């Protein structure tokens, strides 16, 4: 447990990585790691203001849309910076987040193998996860304005596997990150379409009400 906490403190002291000039391969596919501790790096563009992206991701508004293996009872908040994700595949994630700046935040995830959905939902504390951790990994998120859009860069690093119960775990985590990135893009596209549709419906309603108010005057003639 102390080793995990020390690694988190070390991760927080790492200097921010320089912003990239353009996104990596489309849809967030994994780019070549830049350092030995980096296991994954991906970038993608969202046609959404940076502040909206930051707010939605940091406050977990889209979590159920992009994170797999969740059910209605999966999320359990411990405080404003720590929460548990009790997944239906029997893995529990203890997540600690740190916002370094607007558009720049980090999370440390510690996984625990509960082995079933029922046992996963019985985990309600940080101590239950840290008593037998499966792995630990740090995610770093950086946002940057890019010609009216938002460039999202996601880096996974400092991976450590403590148990050998799941083979090729690192590869599975990076594949899951790619899938999450794709779902994040789709979620923001859906929200933008809904917002546009709502705006059009409101405009049509206002025009209809205005026309109805004018009808009595027209009929009087």
Image (tube, rainbow, N blue to C red):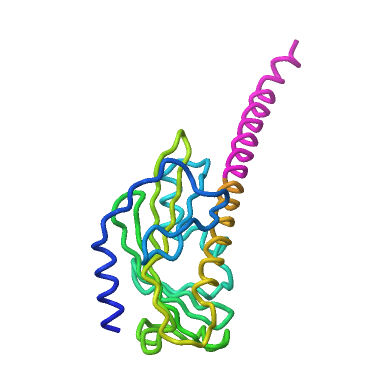
192 vs 67: above or below: above
Relative to 75, 206 lies left or right: right
Q: Tell me what residue is drawn at x 48 percent, y 87 percent.
A: 164
Q: Quadrant of the N terminus?
A: bottom left
User: Where residue 79 sits: x, y (%)?
Assistant: 34, 71
Quadrant location of residue 84? bottom left
67 vs 220: above or below: below
Q: Tell me what residue is drawn at x 55 percent, y 83 percent.
A: 90
Relative to 96, 163 lies left or right: right
Q: Tell me what residue is drawn at x 50 percent, y 42 percent.
A: 48
**What is the magenta segment's predominant secondary structure?**
helix
Q: Quadrant of the C terminus?
A: top right
Indicate whether residue 197 is drawn in magenta: yes
Q: Which residues are magenta?
A: 192-221
Quadrant location of residue 76? bottom left
Residue 95 is at least partly visible in this image: no
Q: Tell me what residue is drawn at x 68 percent, y 28 percent.
A: 208
């Amino acid at each position: 447990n102390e080793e995990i906490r020390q690694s988190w403190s070390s991760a927080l002291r790492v200097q921010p990585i320089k912003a990239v000039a353009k996104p990596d391969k489309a849809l967030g596919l994994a780019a070549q790691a830049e350092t030995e501790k980096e296991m994954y790096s991906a970038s993608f563009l969202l046609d959404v203001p940076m502040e909206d992206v930051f707010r939605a991701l940091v406050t977990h508004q889209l979590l159920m849309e992009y994170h797999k293996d969740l059910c209605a009872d999966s999320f359990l908040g411990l405080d404003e910076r720590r929460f548990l994700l009790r997944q239906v595949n029997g893995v529990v994630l203890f997540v600690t987040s740190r916002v370094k700046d607007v558009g720049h935040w980090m999370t440390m995830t510690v996984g625990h193998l509960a082995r079933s959905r029922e046992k996963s939902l019985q985990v309600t504390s940080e101590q239950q996860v840290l008593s037998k951790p499966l792995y630990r990994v740090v995610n770093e998120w950086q946002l940057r304005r890019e010609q009216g859009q938002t460039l999202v860069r996601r880096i996974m690093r400092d991976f450590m596997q403590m148990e050998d119960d799941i083979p090729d775990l690192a590869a599975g985590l990076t594949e899951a990150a790619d899938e999450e990135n794709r779902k994040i893009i789709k979620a923001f596209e859906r929200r933008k379409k809904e917002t546009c549709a709502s705006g059009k419906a409101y405009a049509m309603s206002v025009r209809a009400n205005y026309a109805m108010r004018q009808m009595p005057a027209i009929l009087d003639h």
